[in-house]
Image: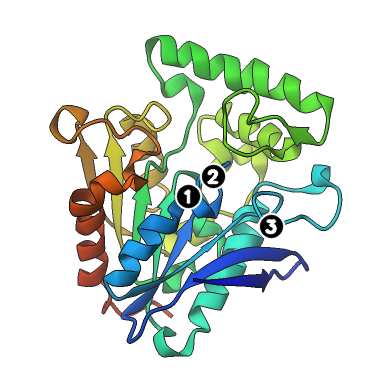
Amino acid sequence: MQSLQIHTHDQQNIAAQFYPCDNAKATVVIASALGVPQSFYRRYANFLNHQGLQCLSFDYRGTGESHYQGRLNNIDLIDWGLQDLNAVLEYAFQLTSVSAKVLFVGHSIGGQMLGMSNYAEKISAVIFIGSSAPYWKRWQGINKLKMFFNSCVLLPVICQFGEVFPAKKIGLSSINLPASVISQWAAWMRDRDYFFGYQFGLDISGYKKITAPLLSYGFDDDNFAPAININWLLQFYSAANIEQRLFKSADIGPVGHMGFFRDSFKDSLWQESADWLLQNVDRKATV
């Protein structure tokens, strides 16, 4: 594993980890969930590495080892895709031995952000894990009340008290996060179309340009990404060749939103995902 600093077009430094291997068949970019440091994916990256897939993980600006140059309140959450992910994908395509073979694994918000990168349409294959468009009204029962309270009350109020959101203290994440990030995230969750909504004025045209095979994993015990919200996100990837796999915890055991990356799934979910990536590695990238 090699530690790297990748420079964005707006002059930020993104901390990344590169997992090289001899005669790599492709480079897999792993994009983290919100509030999850890249170190969480190390065992999965090492597993893919032993399958002949070199990996590149990273921390979004203002999180983990990616220290933001400037005031935290100036961080725009969409720049995690427009700038950070874009710079990492650009770097991946510059790796000469596999310049035309870049694959992508996005966990939660990592999958949401993919279409914001100028390089997304050149990726050969994509896997989403628990990626959805989390509008609070699409939950059911008590979970709907929880998501309403979080997105409409708790998160916006706490964000008023400083530049750092105490995500560790309230049990939202293992790391604290910029308050500006959480404030925007909560606003997105209050919109039917999440950040794709008209009111946010974002250019989402890149999503329709992604034609790669896209495998979306969902789990019936994932309270952060119910199937209805997964499906809502996938509609924006309208040109992709989408395959969905929804697993029941009764069949494979508890997974939730984070469990896919437990090494207890090495011989099942991990191997299945690696085999799928390898089957699609020779797909020609769209120029």
Q: CA distance from mark 2 to mark 3?
A: 12 Å
Q: Position of residue 168 (x, y in %)?
A: 63, 30
Report the disc number at residue 36. Answer: 2
**Residue 198 falls in which quadrant of the image?**
top right
Report the disc number at residue 66. Answer: 3
Residue nearest the viewer, comparing 6 with 46? 46
Taking 87 as reference, is 199 above or below it?
A: above
Q: Which numbered disc flags the more N-terminal residue, 2 or 3?
A: 2
Q: Is residue 248 left or right of residue 152?
A: left
Mark 2 crowdedness (10 Å alpha carbons): few <14, some 14-19, many ≥20: many
**Residue 230 falls in which quadrant of the image?**
top left
Q: The residue tagged with tag 3: helix, strand or loop?
A: loop
> Mark 1, mark 2: which one is toward the viewer?
1
- The image's colour scheme reads rainbow
Label 1–label 2 contact, CB within 8 A: yes
> Mark 1, mark 3: which one is toward the viewer?
1
Q: Which numbered disc flags the more N-terminal residue, 1 or 3?
A: 1
